[in-house]
Image: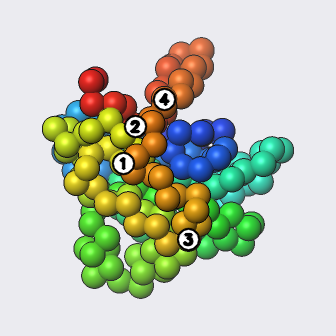
């Protein structure tokens, strides 16, 4: 799987302390994309799904869920379906996925997409439109839809909560995690 980064704990993209997984590769051209560096496949590191699962199982703290973003995760649908299946096998069922595609479009594609949608907790769908960023909630812009399939109590306020950003700093790189406000 072509991955841009994997982080823990991510506390701004879903309920609780989560593993964040960002895929590489995207065919959208959203103006002011938060993760434009993940658009290109060349920025990726190849991981097997088992490598990702091993990383997650090595975390010696509570994991409340996994958030998968990108890039565009559904461009790697075979690996994404395998990842969802293996997350469930290690008892991680709170899986939130971001996609630039619509839910309806994904449903029309095939069995792997259907499997993913049947087994995740929530989906944020639709392309990011900067002028529709109202600075609230877990979606980047108000045209994006929040589909909640499980854990309704955890996710009931996804559209209106106050956004926060996390900063991840390494020796050579600074990464902002979260959904930026409309003032950027």
Residue hosting label 3: 150
Task: Give the alpha-carbon distance from disc 2 to disc 4, as whole Å.
Answer: 7 Å
Contact, mark 3 vs mark 4 (Cβ under 8 Å): no
> For residue 139, which numbered disc appears in the image?
1
Contact, mark 1 vs mark 2 (Cβ under 8 Å): yes
Query: For the point 60% across and 39% down, which residue is it?
Result: 10
Q: Please, is residue 91 above or below residue 54 in the view?
A: below
Q: Hey, which quadrant is residue 112 in on the image?
A: bottom left
Identify the element where label 2 is drawn. Answer: loop
Identify the element where label 4 is drawn. Answer: loop
Task: Give the alpha-carbon distance from disc 3 to disc 4, as whole Å.
Answer: 25 Å
Identify the element where label 3 is drawn. Answer: loop
Give neighbour class at mark 2: few <14, some 14-19, many 20+ (Cα, 10 Å).
many
Q: In this view, does 100 lie to the left or right of 95?
A: left
> For residue 165, which numbered disc appears in the image?
4
Q: Hey, which quadrant is residue 85 in on the image?
A: bottom right
Q: State which tag comes first along the sequence, 1 or 2.
A: 1
Does the rendering let one see residue 29?
yes
Q: In this view, does 143 lie to the left or right of 181?
A: left
In terms of depth relative to the viewer, which is nearer, 79 or 108?
108
Q: State which tag comes first along the sequence, 3 or 2.
A: 3
Q: State which tag comes first along the sequence, 1 or 4.
A: 1
Residue hosting label 2: 179
């Amino acid at each position: 799987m072509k991955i841009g980064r994997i982080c823990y704990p991510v506390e701004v993209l879903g309920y609780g302390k989560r593993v964040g997984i960002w895929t590489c590769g995207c065919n959208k051209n959203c103006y002011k994309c938060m993760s434009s560096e993940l658009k290109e496949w060349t920025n990726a590191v190849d991981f097997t799904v088992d490598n990702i699962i091993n990383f997650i199982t090595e975390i010696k703290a509570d994991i409340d869920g996994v958030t998968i973003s990108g890039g565009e995760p559904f461009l790697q649908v075979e690996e994404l379906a395998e990842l969802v299946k293996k997350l469930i096998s290690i008892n991680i069922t709170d899986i939130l996925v971001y996609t630039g595609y619509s839910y309806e479009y994904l449903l029309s594609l095939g069995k792997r997409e259907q499997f993913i949608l049947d087994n995740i907790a929530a989906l944020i769908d639709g392309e990011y439109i900067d002028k529709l960023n109202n600075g609230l909630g877990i979606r980047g812009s108000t045209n994006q839809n929040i589909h909640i399939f499980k854990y309704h109590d955890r996710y009931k306020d996804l559209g209106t909560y106050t956004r926060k950003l996390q900063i991840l700093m390494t020796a050579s790189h600074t990464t902002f995690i979260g959904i930026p406000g409309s003032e950027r």
